[in-house]
Amino acid sequence: MTKEIIINSTNEETRIAILEDSKLVELFVERPEYERMVGDIYKGKVSRVLPGMQAAFINIGQEQNAFLHFSDVSASYQDYFIDYEEDMDDHDHTETARREKSFDVARTLKKDQDILVQIIKEPISTKGCRVTTEVALPGRFVVLVPYKQQIGVSRKISDHKERQRLKNIARQILPKHFGLIIRTVAEGKEEKIIRKDLNALLATWKKMEKKIKEDQAPALVYKDMAMASSIIRDLFTADVDKVVVDSRKLKREIESYVKYVAPQMTHKITYYSEKVPIFDQYKIEKEIENMGNSRVWLKSGGYIIIEPTEALVSIDVNSGKFIGKKDHESNSLKTNLEAAREISRQARLRDLGGLIVIDFIDLRDETNKKKIYSELKKEFAKDRSITKIEGISRFGLIEMTRQRVRPSVLYTINDTCPTCNGTGLVPTLNTIVSAIERWIQRYRVSRGDRRITLHVTPDVFNYLNKGRYSRRLKLMWKYWMKIRLVKDKQLKIGQFAVYDRTDKKKLDV
C-alpha cells in the first residue's frame, strides 16, 4: 500500500490530505479563526460541580465552559500546583495507589478552584470542548505524563522482545515523578534518539511549570503544534512514501522539524511547483466536492447512503445497478464486501463519530455474514480513532461506535443552508400558496384594506398566474380583494412579503 501526505496552503487555510493507494482517506482543514485545540493545556477555574451529572464545568477562557467528566479526573490532579522539588519527594507508588482508592471527585472538586486540564475533544455544535486532568505532552517517539509513574508501550508494537527493550530504555532515562508512553514510531530506535525526544519534552514541561504557578486562571499554558506540524509528528512514519507541499515556507518548517527528529526521512519531503493546483493534480478536489453527497457509488454499480443525524449516523447499502453473474447471495456478498471497505474510508474521510448503524444487503448464510463483519473489522483497524464493532444483529444491522475528537470536516468547509436550515428540504409551491391564503384570512378578519401588493419569488409568481382562471384570481374572488403580484428575486425560497396598495408600507407576515 502506498501512503502519501499532500499539503495545500493558501492565505485562507491549510488543507492536509492523507492518500492510501492514491485514494483520499483523511482530510484536515485549519484556518486562522479555527485552529486545532486538541492537546492544548489550560490553567482553568472550576465554574460548577454537578454530582448529578457526574461532571464539572471548567472556565478556560473560551466562549463556552469546558466539560470535565468525573471519570477524567485523577487523584493527582492537584499535584501540578505542588512545589515539584520539595513536596513531591515522598510521593511513592503506594501513596499514589492509596489516594486513587479513597479519592471522591464530587467531594474534592470545589467551585472557583484552580485546575490544570487538557483538551481531548474539540467543541461540537453547542457543546463546549471536553477536557481531562490527565495531562500528557506528545513528542515524536514518546508521550510524557507528569506525576504518573507508569511506563506504557504502543499496542501496535507487537514484538515481545522489542516491547521489553523499549520498556528497559524508558526505565533508565525516565526521571522521578513522570510516566512515559512509547509511541509506535519508536520501534527499532536507539536510546539516544528516544532520550533526545524526552529531554525536549522535559524542557517544555519546565517552562509550563513556571506558567502554571505564575499565570492567573483562566490561562493557556501549553499550545500544541499547528495542524500541519502535528500531523507530520503523528503520521509521518516510515510507511509514508512522500510528503508533497505547495508552500516553500511550510516545506522549510516541516523540514526543520523532521531534521531534528528523523533526519533520514527528509528526502521524502518535496515541493510542488506545477501550475495546476496540487489538489487537482492528485484528484483530491473532486473527492472533497463529493463529500457532501449522501449517496456514494461503488465500482460494482452498488451504492451506500450516509445520513448523519443528531442521535446517530445511518448507513444503507444498496445493490443499485449491479446485477452480477452469480446467484443473489454471492452478488449481495460481493456488494457488501465492497461497501464495507468504502464505509471505512468514508468514516475516516468525513470523520463520522458516535453511534453508527449499518444496514447491509440481507444475507442468509451465517458464514457470509461473518465475512462482512471480519472485513469491516479489518478495514477499521487502519483507523486511528477508537472503534467498537458489534456482530450482525437478527435484523441484519451492524452497530458500531467511532471516537470523535473534532467536528466533522464537512462543517469546517460548509455552512448550514440559510434557506432550508440544514434540513435539505424546502416548502413546495402548494405549501407556500396555502401560507399566503392563511395570511389573507387573518388579514380579512382584522378588516384591513381590500387592496394589497404581494411580493413573491419568481416560481410562485408563475404558479399563481398560470392558466386562464389563475390561482391569483381565485384568491381575489374568494376573499373579495384586489391582489397585485410583484416578482421579487431578493426573496428566499418559501418567503413572501405583503405591502399596502401603494407598495410602500410593509405589512406584518
Image (cartoon, rainbow, N blue to C red):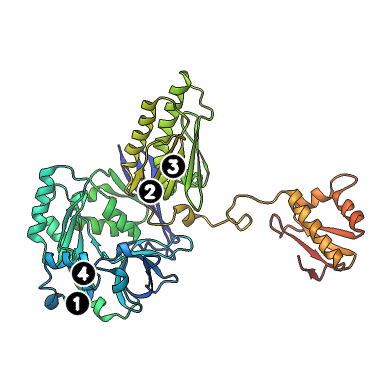
In space, the residues marked 3 and 2 are separated at their CA atoms by 27 Å
Residue 244 as seen in the image, left or right of residue 440: left
Question: According to the image, label 1 marks what residue?
Answer: 82
Q: Secondary structure at mark 2?
A: strand
Whole-percent x and y of residue 343?
A: 42, 40
Q: Secondary structure at mark 3?
A: loop
Q: Amino acid at mark 1?
A: Ile
Residue 183 % position (x, y) = 21, 52
C-alpha separation, residue under disc 1 versus residue under disc 2:
37 Å
Badge 3 amino acid: Lys
Tell me: residue 8, above or below residue 321: below
Q: Is residue 315 above or below residue 446?
A: above
The amino acid beneath tag 2 is Arg
Compare marks 3 and 2 and give the one earlier in the sequence: 3
Residue named by callout 3: 283
Q: Earlier in the sequence, mark 3 or mark 4?
A: 4
Q: Earlier in the sequence, mark 1 or mark 4?
A: 1
Disc 2 and disc 4: Cα gap in Å?
A: 32 Å
The quadrant holding residue 228 is bottom left
Q: How far apart are the two marked residues, 3 and 4, measured between alpha carbons? A: 42 Å
Q: Is residue 126 visible?
A: yes
Residue positioned 90% across, 64% down in the render: 450
* Residue indicated by mark 2: 402
Image quadrant containing the N terminus: top left
Q: Secondary structure at mark 1?
A: loop
Task: Pick whichever of labels 2 and 4 is earlier in the sequence.
Answer: 4
